[in-house]
Image: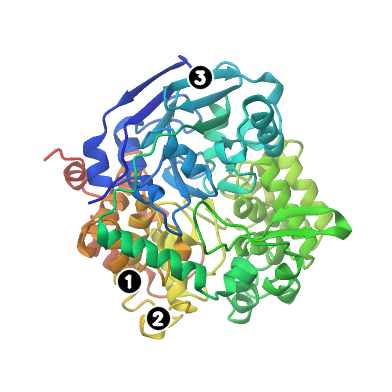
Amino acid sequence: MRHARGPLLSVDVGERTWRTDDVDAARERFVGGRGLGTRLAYERVPFDADPLAPENRLYFAAGPLQTATTSFAGRLSCTGLSPLTDGLLSSNAGGFLPGNFVGAGYAAVEVAGESDELVAVHVREDGVEFEAVPQLAGAEVSTVTQWARDAHGLDGDHVACVGPAGENAVRFAAVVTTDHRAFARGGLGAVLGSKGVKAITFDGDADPGPDLDAAAGEVASAVHREAAESDHVMKRQGTASLTTFASEVGALPTRYFSELSFEGADAVGGERVAEKKTGRGTCSRCAFACKLPTVDEDRSIETEGPEFETIMAFGSNAGVDDLPAVMHANDRCDELGLDTISCGDVVSAYLAAEDAFGDADLVHDLIEKIAYRQGVGDLLAEGIARCHDDLGVPDWTMKGMEFAAHDGRALAGQGLAFATSNRGADHLYGGMYVYEYPLVDREAALPADGLDGKAERLVASENRNAALDSAIACRFSRGTLTDDRLATLLDASERELDALGSRVVDLERGFNNRRGRDWNDDDDLPFALDGLSAALDTYYDLRGWNADGTVPRARCDRHLGRE
């Protein structure tokens, strides 16, 4: 199976040391990206680690597709123990960082320890430099990017950094690159901030080459060509194109999950976003170009997007039907280093408690307070699972993570996917909504209601997504990067890719089991879903897990080659 190439670079920011380790066996078995990060974390992060303590580690990892000239591969993965969910998770970000990461010559970079002063870590082919950066304390993302350009001649495509939210250990802080692209979900920005690391830069000219044979090269070219030629609505409206449709089918969380459609959906949806766009943005080498730089000249707001999930969180769920207000919220989250989904949901929870839906000025004020942990922002920075009792509102989280859109009360299979996800209430982990809207061809579609037969589809979908995240390839490749094409690119059979995904999912849950997590409770949704218990039983059986949803220890040992 084709896999990432290069050693593991292990950086201890407390000791100011670095070394390289051979991880050939891990790369061969887990390919790269999320798979490699999960494999390394399972063996190198203590099972009883505090997410914000020095013993937690972050793993940035590329996959074999990051060196190929094709579309949908401009992404990088980050894995660590989440301060939001208290479990192991991976997040990936697009942009142009992956090319510079691969240029530094490493398959993965591990960040360990804790610095006693704020530092930037410069990763290059010839090693690592540690730089004290006290002047960047409290700096927003664009300020860090400008510093990297002025001080080191590196633009934002070389930088992964945290904003004030990461420094202040907001549990849903993001690591941001290229100014607007983020390793967002799960609070890994707080982990980097807890280590005293403001920024990591990657630079170098290492070129391991794409390592593609003739068949894979033909597939890469075909994928790239079709991405360029396709006339997809996402090229015009981005993921915001889903907003009105989701509201019409009753799957758009509204006013802190109390309703399922939003009367203001058209005002914040795809057509309105398209009116604000100033061009098309993309990720490294990708011809699909689905990112939308946007401007509202009347209010002097310039940002990227917003994406559909951000529109849900700061639009419908907050009761705000003013697109420039949502754009401002999106831009402030990018600058401060916050996951827009968790932040918007937390803000919406506060609006519910105060009966203040629709108050955009309050929304914007709360974003600032959260990032700096000022006033009520200190409470909200803990996330809904930890603050809902104080607010007197329901706990709309799964495993501690705030819910994404594509509501599981309307899309039953997506509800099941939220329940089983090791990552928490994230829509991309299982991605069942694509079959239930549907966003796929009719022959692959599923009815929105009921759970009959959906556990089988969910296992396959989770496994494929884990394989994609190990490759690493974008979810928006759906329909272009087909199963057979992905198998050719990775020099594997479809069965081998399914097994790869299964190994990743097993290790994620196995790690969290070792932390003492009670998955019988953790897989229970905050809303009623007919047939959930039976579907979970089927799901656990299909995965070869115990009846309580835990992974047999021997199964994880086998994945690690300890038989």
Q: Is residue 261 above or below residue 462?
A: below
Q: Position of residue 399 (x, y in %)?
A: 46, 51
Could you say which is closer to the camera, residue 372 or residue 322?
A: 322
In the displayed structure image, the side of residue 378 where residue 408 appears, left or right: left
Q: Position of residue 307 (x, y in %)?
A: 63, 61
Residue shown at 47% from the left, 44% from the top: 98
Q: Residues within 10 Å of mark 1 (few under 14, many from 20)?
A: some
The answer to whether the residues at label 2 and label 1 have Cβ atoms under 8 Å apart is yes
Q: Earlier in the sequence, mark 3 or mark 1?
A: 3
- Give the residue type that dot 1 points to: Arg
Could you say which is closer to the camera, residue 159 or residue 135?
A: 159
Q: Position of residue 283 (x, y in %)?
A: 54, 53
Quadrant containing the C terminus in the rendered view: top left
Q: Residues within 10 Å of mark 3 (few under 14, many from 20)?
A: some
Q: Position of residue 132 (x, y in %)?
A: 61, 17
Q: Which residue matches tag 1?
A: 457
Q: Is residue 341 above or below residue 12?
A: below
Could you say which disc has been placed on residue 129 in the image?
Answer: 3
Q: Which residue matches tag 2?
A: 446
Dividing the picture into quadrants, the one containing residue 405 is bottom right
